[in-house]
Amino acid sequence: MYSDIELHNIGSLPIFDGKELHYEKNTSIQVKDGIITNIGSPVTVKSIDCNGKLVTPGFVDSHTHPIFDNTRNSEHQQRLSGVSYEEIAKNGGGIVSSINGVRMCSAEELYLKALKRMDRFISLGTTSIEAKSGYGLDTESELKSLEVIEKTNLNHCIDLAPTFMGAHAFPPEYENDHEGYVRLIIKDMIPRVAHQGIAKYIDVFCEEGYFSIDQTRSILECGREYGLAPRLHADEFNNFGASQLASDVGAVSADHLMAIDDNSIQSLIDNNVIATLLPGTTFFLNKKTYAPARKLIDNGATVALATDYNPGSCHIQSMPFIMTLAVMNMSMTIEEAFIAATYHGAAALGFENEIGSVEINKKADLVVWDIDNLTDIAYYVTDHPIRYVIKNGQIVFGA
């Protein structure tokens, strides 16, 4: 459903055209049929007085894992006691512990849980997300998870970009037969996912103890043959060569990158792979080393920010908080963090011509803030002063 609306007397409007960020003051935005049609010239339609307020594009969260049954809050308590993520996983926790819930839940149960999570995303100013499967880890459960993503996309105002991630971990039944599980993904899962026609992307957790470089390459190349664009969990805990692999296979994005090296940074740049950084995961796992955002940006990489929202290692849905972490712990400027959380997030999904910035002919996905500058988004660490969220020209939060 679309709407005609005008936002007038906008106190501050940051506009990013893909190259430069500039601000317009005391301006207006006109929307017709959910699309921005004009900036600056007032017309007489339903209007919102934005006097003294900041108006931004909605956040684009390009890395989430929202299809699961229950949280893993018991693991959080273990981490607070000093147990590492890797140790928890070796003892049967982590990704594998979410499998039974997804396998046993009906699609309808997962769908109802997903809807509540999408409401929360919207309330925090996020209007588009990438959504991964990856907690079923058998063919039927992965297909079910993708069906839930599609149904949520059709029935909730938020936009979801579906990613197949059967290669998230090795399920218990393949604990001693990793190559057998890789064969299952390649011979059964990927062909059926492609036939289902929901997933746009394929992702692999390429890390020590998970999928090797060779296994990851085989899975991503197979997915690409079936029309699934590759993305990659890369160099999260170890400098494993996964970032270089992302460049080799033409991945859309390489995500995490806490352990990336200089050569791999240059390779991402040379091959136009977007570096999607997830500082919420570093924070949530109580790690000390954040991804080298400053080095990536200074060398010319395109950097996006995302939440990595999931039930275990990062139960964070707030993109404003991710911006706070980026400016406090990764030496990003507020403008860099804002662009990374909006325009570059859209670019990581291939949607930068539709969303991610306030421009004529783009979707009217907007956030009206009870603040008047970008700095305050990161400054209000635990308080998100959002007055309205507008999706496709319609007020979906704050009305």
Image (cartoon, rainbow, N blue to C red):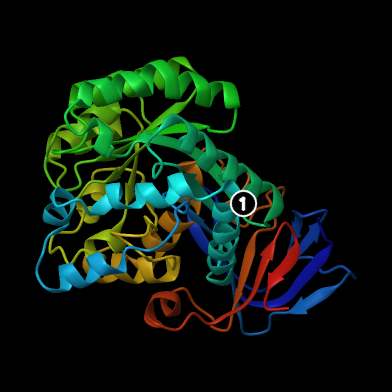
Relative image position of residue 205 (x, y in whole percent): 28, 38
The residue under the point 49% across, 77% down is 373
Q: How many marks?
A: 1
Viewport quadrant of the C terminus: bottom right
Residue identified by numbered label 1 = 108
Q: Is residue 35 above or below residue 246?
A: below
The residue under the point 19% across, 53% down is 292
Q: Can residue 29 be seen in this view?
A: no
For numbered disc 1, what is the local secondary structure?
helix
Q: Is residue 146 visible?
A: yes
The residue under the point 45% across, 84% down is 383
Mark 1 is surrounded, within 10 Å at the Cα level, by few (under 14), some (14 to 19) or many (20 or more) other residues, namely: few
Q: In this view, does 256 lie to the left or right of 131?
A: left
Q: In this view, does 215 lie above or below 318?
A: above
Using the rendered view, name the quadrant where residue 323 is placed. Answer: bottom left
Viewport quadrant of the N terminus: bottom right
Relative image position of residue 215 (x, y in whole percent): 23, 23
Q: Is residue 351 left or right of residue 312?
A: right
Which of 181/391 is in front? 181
The residue under the point 44% across, 24% down is 189
Q: In this view, does 33 lie above or below 348?
A: below
Q: Is residue 329 left or right of residue 333?
A: left
Q: Is residue 218 left or right of residue 16?
A: left
Using the rendered view, name the quadrant where residue 212 is placed. Answer: top left
Q: In this view, does 362 lie above or below 195?
A: below
Circle 1: residue type: Glu
Which of 26/171 is in front? 171
Residue lying at the far right of the rendered structure: 44
